[in-house]
Amino acid sequence: MDWLDYAFILVAYVVAGGIKGLTGIGFSTSCLPIMALRLDLKVAIPLVIVPSVVSNLAVMLQAGGFREAVRRFWPLYAAVIPGLLCGLAILVAINADTSKAVLGLVLVTYALWALGNKSFPLSEAWERILKVPAGFCTGFVNGLTGSQVMPVLPYLLSLNLGKSAFVQAINISFTLSSLIMLVGMNRLGLLTSGTFLVAIAGLIPVLLTVYLAGRLQHHLSGSLHRKLVLTFLLIMGLALLAKLLI
């Protein structure tokens, strides 16, 4: 990698850390689109995993209710694993531009859905029925693109969980996916020692930015945070799609 590659990595870490601190949104979802503008996703995803795990664990410790979340959503978490392995297998086989386009499409879909404030409350029966499909599809999209939010985020939002319960439930999914990705990338030879060292070094700007952004959070309205972040993700998704077309 040259100096411009490292500059993109640093910018991605700082921006994603700031968004994580301000809103709690998945670190990798914000970080990957920036890196993908410059780097192959097979290089970018390993660089995101370590900071993602650390930031997610910090949020989980603050949220509480870990056992309750695992007891309620264990089928979803279990289904993430085979889905993620399938996505990883396809990621290795397909063209890098194709995986970037899929990531762009996922981000655009999610941003438009969230900006539209669409709500689809699920009954207890549908909650049980959709746990395994939601988990498998989340793992598949994660393995193929590195994005961890679809469709687990809209699924959990549709259950009207309390704030702490929601944060804990979704961050368990994020953390599980990240740990499996870490092992999978290592087995596939994509997590090199150099990549791992860059990711470890990236913890410094990430944690610092998360801390500073968390302090600023109290001075900005929640609705403004949300709109800014979703607009950013929408722009990044469109940029990835446009890059493929151009």
Image: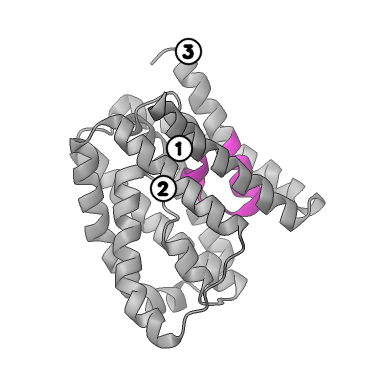
Left or right: 58, with 151 as reference point: right
Which quarter shows the C terminus? top left
Task: Give the CA distance from mark 1 to mark 2.
Answer: 8 Å
Give the residue drawn at x 60%, y 41%.
232
Q: Is residue 198 above or below residue 150?
A: above
Q: Earlier in the sequence, mark 3 or mark 2?
A: 3
Residue at the outermost right position: 219
Mark 1 and 2 residues: CB-CB less than 8 Å, in contact? yes
Q: Residues within 10 Å of mark 2 (few under 14, many from 20)?
A: many
- Which type of secondary structure does the marked residue at label 2 adopt? loop
Outermost residue on the top side: it is 2
Q: Residue 13: give its label.
A: none
Instruction: Please report the bounds of the magenta region as a residue range.
Output: 15-31
Q: Nearer the viewer, mark 3 or mark 2?
A: 2
Residue under pointer 1 = 32
In the picture of the structure, the residue carrying the numbered disc 3 is 3
Residue topped by disc 2: 147
Q: Residue at x 33, y 51 (%)?
A: 141
What's under tag 2, amino acid-wise?
A: Ser
Q: Check residue 16 for magenta coloring.
A: yes
